[in-house]
Every structure is written in C-alpha cells, then in structure tokens.
Image (cartoon, coloured by chain):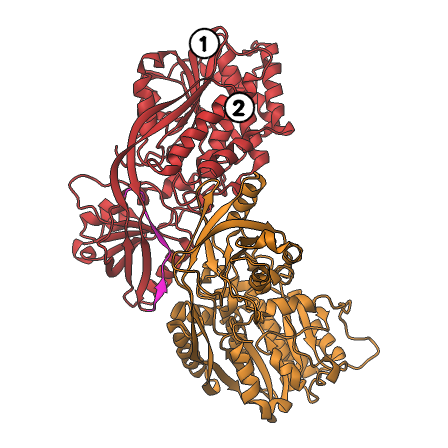
Chain colours: A orange, B red
Amino acid sequence: MRGGTLRWTHIHALALTALALGEPAVAADAPPVIPPEMRRTAEALVDKAFVGTRASEWVRGLVDTAGSRLSGSPGDKLAIEWGVATLKRLGFANVRAEKLMAPHWVRGVETGEVVAPYPHKLFLTALGGSVPTPESGLDAEILEVANLEELDAKKPEDVRGKIVFINKRMQRTLDGTGYGKAADVRHRGASRAAKQGAIGVIIRSIGTDSNRTPHTGGMRYLDGIPKIPAAAVSNPDADLLERLGKEGKPVRVRFTLGCRDKGEAETANVIGEVPGRGSPKEIIVLGCHRDAWELGTGAEDDAAGCGIVIEAARLIAGLGSRPRRTIRVVLYANEENGLAGGRKYAADHAAELPLHAAALEADLGSGRPIGFSWNAGPSSIPLMKEISSLLEPLGASALTPDGLGGADISPLVLSGVPLFSVRQEASRYFDLHHTPNDTFDKIDIPSLDKMTAAVAAFAYVAASMKEPFEKIPAEKRKLPEF
Amino acid sequence: MRGGTLRWTHIHALALTALALGEPAVAADAPPVIPPEMRRTAEALVDKAFVGTRASEWVRGLVDTAGSRLSGSPGDKLAIEWGVATLKRLGFANVRAEKLMAPHWVRGVETGEVVAPYPHKLFLTALGGSVPTPESGLDAEILEVANLEELDAKKPEDVRGKIVFINKRMQRTLDGTGYGKAADVRHRGASRAAKQGAIGVIIRSIGTDSNRTPHTGGMRYLDGIPKIPAAAVSNPDADLLERLGKEGKPVRVRFTLGCRDKGEAETANVIGEVPGRGSPKEIIVLGCHRDAWELGTGAEDDAAGCGIVIEAARLIAGLGSRPRRTIRVVLYANEENGLAGGRKYAADHAAELPLHAAALEADLGSGRPIGFSWNAGPSSIPLMKEISSLLEPLGASALTPDGLGGADISPLVLSGVPLFSVRQEASRYFDLHHTPNDTFDKIDIPSLDKMTAAVAAFAYVAASMKEPFEKIPAEKRKLPEF
C-alpha cells in the first residue's frame, strides 16, 4: 500500500467500538496472577509518574535535533543518527539502524485563493501523496458536499470540471475517536471526486482547531481513476467557503500544489534492547515512529511516543533485577506515508516473530493514559485486569479487550503476536496533528510521565511473567483494512 | 508619525493604571441625573443584549466582502464600498467616504530558518513598516536579549553584525493589559538594535497563543539610525530559539523579507449619521477602524468594533423618539499603520469639534464589556455612575475615570472632546491579534451583543441629556506619547 494511510489513530477508533470490561479488579476468590514481589516492582515503576521521568528529554532531543523529518528528508537522516546515538548513550544493547526503502514525497509551492464572489486568500496544504497541480494551478467553481456519501450521490454532470469541496467536520472527543469518523474524506476523497469528473478536491481539515494551519496527512489514489490534486483548507477557510456558498453565488477557487513523488529513499528503523535475563530471545517490542509530517516538528506525533518507550525501557533497565524477556525499543520509519518501517520489521524478523511475546506502540501524543486496549488470546484477561489495577493511581485502569496495537506493529497481527496499546486522552491532540503547530511546547510533561510509567509497568510485567500472553487466536489475525 | 504605531490597546494599558471608583451607584441623597423616561429607554437598549442584535451581520459583511484590507490594498477599497453601501442600506443619513492619503506598505516574500546548530524552518513575518532584507536575505548569528533594557546594556562589539532576538513574552490577562507591557519591543526594537550595530531584529510575537502564526503589527524607525529589517517569529519558534540558545552553541538564523514601502495611497473614512432632533449640530462620534492587518481578515480587529458601533447607532435610530444630538458613526481608515484616518478626521472637522459632545471607539474585539474608561471633566462622574449602573445586567459597571478613548479618536483630545471607551474582556484577543487567525469564526456573538447594547445605552444617554459632558480639562488635553 505505497503512499497509503494506515494511521493508528484511525485503527484506534475502530477498537473503541469494543465493549469495556467494567471495573478492573482482581477477583476476590482467585489467587493473584502477578507474584507479590513483581507487583511491588511494577508499583514502583508506576510511582515514577509522580516523581517525574526523563521522557521529555528524549522528546526534545528528537524534535530539536531532527525537526521536520518525513521519510527521505534531511531531517529523517538526522533522526536516525539521533536515535542511534541516544540509545547507545543511554546504555541500550544491540543498537542498530535497520535500513529499508520508503516512499519519498516532497511538498512544493502551495497557494490558494477564493477568486469569486470576493477575493480571499485560502490557507491550504497538499495532502500527503497528492499529485501536483499544473504550474498555473487549478481554477474552477467549487461544488460543496458534506461527505463522501453525498459526493457519490451527485450526478457526474454536476461534478464534471469542478473542484469538489468536502466539508466534513471532525468532532472533538476525549479520546480522539472523532478522527476515525472524519478521516475517510482525506483517505478516499480524491478518487471518489475524480470518479465523478472533478478536476481537484479540497477537504476541510481533519482537525479540531480553528487556526489557519491546514492539516496534512496521507491519502491514496485508487487504480484506474485519474489522479487529481488534493488539498486540505484550514477550518476557518472551510468556514469561509461554507458561508460564501450559502450566499448562493458561484464560489470560484484557484490553487497550486507543487508537490512531487520522488520515488523511494533509504531510511531505517532504529532499534535498541534491554536484554532479558532468563529468556533473552523472547521479545517485548515497545514501538513508536520516528518520522513525522514535515509541516511541524512532530513533537506530539510521534516524538512523544518515542520519548515514552525509550524512557520506559530505560527505567526497566535501571531496576535491580532485570525481567526475563528482552525489551526491544523500535523507533519505526515511515509510519506517516507508507508504513514501510512496520512492514519491513515484520518481514526481516519473521523468523523470530514466534518469540515475540508482546508488542505495544505509543502514537497518540503526550495525553494522559486512560487504560489498555489489546488483541491477544482470551486467557490474557485476568493478567490484564491485574496490570490495569496497577494503573489505578494514574486513573488509567479502563480495559478495552479488542485493540489493534498501533500502525507500525499492526503487521505482526498475522503472526499472532499479542498487540497492546495504552489508550490516551486526546481531546487537544487533533488541534495540532499534522500541522506546523505540532511543536515541543505542546508536550504535556506530567501526562507524558504518566504514560511512560504506564508503559513501563506493562512492559515490565509482560517481560517478567513466567507464562507469556496467549497468542492472538487465528480468527483475529487480520490486518486492518482501509 | 508616518508608519507609526499608535495602537489603542497600548493606550488602554496606560488607562488601567488609574484608580477605579469603587461601586458605581447613585448616591441615595442625590436626585437622579438621568430622567426616568430616558432611563427606561436606555434599559430597553441594554435588554437588546439578551434579545440578540444584528451586530454580527455587519461584522460578517465587512469580513467576507473585503477580507484582507490594509490601507491601499484592493480589500481597503472593497471595505470603503461595503461601508458606504451598508450604511446607506441601513438608512443612515449623510453617508459619505471622506477621502485621505495614508501610508501604503505591502508585505512580500517571507522566509526564515535556523541554519545552525540544527536546521529548522522558522515561521516569521515582517513587522508592519519594516524595510526589506537584501534579496538573498540576512544570515547571521543571533544575540538573544530579554528586553530593550538588556539590549541597551550590551556592548556594541557584542551586537555588531548580529541579528538581535528580543525574547520578551506577553502575559495573558483578563483585559489584555499584557499587550501594552510587551509591545515596546515591536515598536522600538529595530532602532534600538540598529543603534548597537545589529543588522536585523527578530522579536518573539506579541501574542498569547502557541501557534506557528507570528503576529505582525506596526513599528517605526528613529531618524538618524540605520533602518534594519524587523520580523516577529511565532511563539513556538521563539521557544525553539530559546532552547537552542541554552545549549550554548551559536545559533545562526537566515531570513528574507520582501516587503515594500509604496509611499501613500488614497483611502477614506466612511461616515454615516443618525441626525439628532433638538441639537443636530452637536455630535456623538461612535468610531471603529475599517482597515486591518492583511495576514488575516481583521474580524476581531476591528470588524467587531464596526459591527458594534453600526448596530448601536441603528438600534438608536429605531427608537420611537430620537435623541437630541446627532450620532455619527465613523469607520476610520488606516488605524493600523499610520492613524491617518483619525488625524484627517480631526483636521477636516476642526471647525465643528467644539460641538463634538463625546467620542467613543470600539477596538478590542468581541469580548464582553467590563465597564467604562473615559477622559472628561470631573462633573462627568455622577452621570457616568448612572450610565454604568444601567450596565449592571451586563456585568459591565466598573468605572475607570482616566481612559483615552481609542487610537482613532485620540487626536480629538486636543480639542477637549470627552473621550470614552467600553472596557472589554480580552483574555483570548491576543491569541489571534494581527495574525492569519483573526477570522469571523472567532467572533463571540453573545458578547458582541452585550458590547453593542452597552455602547447603544451610553450613546443614547450621551446624545439625549440636556447638558453635555464637561470638556476635558486643559491639563489633560495631551496626545498620548510613544
């Protein structure tokens, strides 16, 4: 799925349709699954949330050193260097960059304006993977639709030659689930509009803010349908188009995108390990993604996740007694526009995937933890209840036993590797997601510390329990479809 | 003061150092100043706040029709046309555009980047009135200072050849008074840095947000000092420069400004009147400014003020019995970069200024009213206490008897015209002030209605009372200095 759009936050939305398990608690009449000493150590890790952790240092290191870092960019290379140097400096074992090829798309000139009925500048940005406009731009009347279904129902003669404006508004929710409900427009809008004869598509940004900073993000073209330029306008600009449209006069728009598909470029997953003591070949993957859309500096998306998993592993490495299994931190490449990092990891490590005891990914910013979602065999439930009870001091004990883990680790589902995610508050995350505003000042450090503690406690227990989690049952070993 | 920076919000900050008068109330033993029937009519105007007004329609009309409208721009002309057409359509009398010449400055290409120690894009924008950089840009190490005082204390050899970065942070306050305390950096930073040998100046945006949308605004050069390019970086970019500076390595920045001083251009104050019944030659001016910095569409600054004063006058025109004096709505030109509109009004109307009974300006967005500040003779106090008691239902009865009215009406001070302002909540106003984010969606319509009602009640009473306000005493007839 080159140039595809497998976004974890989208997957996440699906997961939350699952039933919660109610109050997590250890049944009074069952013996505890986690031995007392292991529990005490895990509790000490949870307490790190209140002492403070160094997670924000690693976030800041990645953000300030590498900045803008889409696959193939100079920042991408700096981020690989930073990742290798940082993991080595922190004492991780087997630190390496596992090379791979990933899509290389670059943004170019971007201009937008309302030509009629009144002149206005439009703040817009190319969706990731879009083809460019002609150099002179596109200039046409817009046809406003509320969503893809309304677009599909239009007569081709009403769409032909127009720029389709898809005006679907993302809703703000506690956990960011509004994103999954709106993002279809970004993923599929261009081909759906082109199928009806449109010459370009403009979408309302998939975001909850009211800034003139449009939200980019991956899109893809369907085979056999003309590829038309696709851009997002900021929410205030979408409001303007909506108001002008209500006046009843034709609204004409002109825009230019100079983006380019440059084929593929070399990049790398950056990996470091905390070797296990008893069963070092058994692996707990803690993942995040090292790349970021290049408009901002990807502090929340996903330097935050990298800070969380690096620090969680570092805290475990510093314990008096190391856990049984190896904790493997993977800073994935190319989550945003291709998922080449996640796929390559699954392919290169196919032989050892049967020994992957669990994989968890952090990719929803620095918001506080809410609880777990996961995909594993049903016998995982009692242990997950106990782990979640550990997180009660963090207010993060909700359980959603039907998650998908995360975009980069999602290919592991085919091998049955148990997949985990710590759900997070994300009510402000989509104000800045995929915009220039995703910068270090947005990191909520106390919440980041809570997330770090939650991931550390989970990883420590998962790496220490004698019996690993039950693998994903065969019927649940399905790649998410988009 | 061509290209000067007489900003009302700055003046306002000074006003608030004045003592408040405590609880506004009519002294129990004094007869009421406002006759009962007049008071009932004023109360009915206050009630419009809760019924709803049409102020937001006029805001939207100006913003959507004229959009970006700095003096001399195409939008400026559209705004004049809109103003004349709208005032005529609403039935105002003597509607006209009083032409004048104003500074014509245009923004050009703007680029910014951190070159060392790590590559980063910088989001910056020219301060209004800045000279351009050479076409190849400026490229130099930055010297960070906290404020003008620290800059002045530097040795010239430490400043020479550098780009000075003034990192003064504006504080968020209820009524926006943090602005006046930070804006000196924007007004005076360039000449103060140039005096020490700097080749350019970059300031932290004067704004309370954390968006990558830098705040522009007027600046001026002192005579006899080289004019150096002046830009504002967004707050997150200033944070980045600050963090990089703390690493101890030299921070090198490159930036390009393509702005141009194009001399002067024709513009106009747009005026319409509600003629008085008994003393139509006596004038109550209700002012706002029609121009706006061109990055956004000036919805809060100052289409909001125009909506307020137009609607307040329209509500008064619709009363069963019209007040004694004429209400004159003035949509001033060129408040942002020259104040040519305010000066020209004072000059052209010099002969009738003795008959100007009061002037009020609305120029702080759509925030709710808090109370009054004003400058008039001391006998104004009992009447102002009664007017403020009318506004108790709006929560707007605080009195600050030492205001300056507003930038556009400030030249009237020399003639002793009593000057008034309704103070407003402005805690969010400086998130978007002078940025692209100043768009119609930011208008707080219920608060705008409250402001409209407050202005209408004041103007009605000021226009109806038999005795006009006492003129400003001679010792207080001073133009604010900057």
Chain ID of residue with mark 2: B
Q: CA distance from mark 1 to mark 2?
A: 18 Å
Residue A436 x/y as whole percent: 45, 59
Residue drawn at (39%, 53%) of the image: B234
- Look at the image and tell me in which quarter the N terminus of chain A lies: bottom right
Find residue A392 and report its image quarter: bottom right
Does A84 appear in magenta?
no
Q: Which residue type does callout 1 highlight? A: Pro
Disc 2 crowd, CA 10 A, few/some/many (<14, 14-19, 20+): many
Find residue B246 and report its image quarter: bottom left
In this view, B341 is above or below A39:
above
In this view, B410 is above or below A114:
above
What residue is disc 1 on?
A: B280
Depth check, front residue: B56 or A156: A156
Depth check, front residue: A275 or B219: B219
Looking at the image, the residue that sits furthest to the top is B278
Residue drawn at (61%, 10%) of the image: B37
Residue B66 x/y as whole percent: 44, 37
* Residue range corresponding to the magenta coloring: B118-129
Q: Which mark is residue B401?
A: none
For the residues labelled 1 and 2, say whether their Cβ atoms are less than 8 Å apart.
no
Q: Earlier in the sequence, mark 1 or mark 2?
A: 1
Helix, strand or loop at label 1? It is strand
What residue is disc 2 on?
A: B312
Left or right relative to A84: residue B223: left
The answer to whether residue B18 of the structure is visible from this angle is no
In this view, B260 is above or below A417:
above
Q: Which residue type does callout 2 highlight? A: Ala
Depth check, front residue: A72 or B418: A72
Residue A282 x/y as whole percent: 61, 90
- Look at the image and tell me in which quarter the C terminus of chain A lies: bottom right
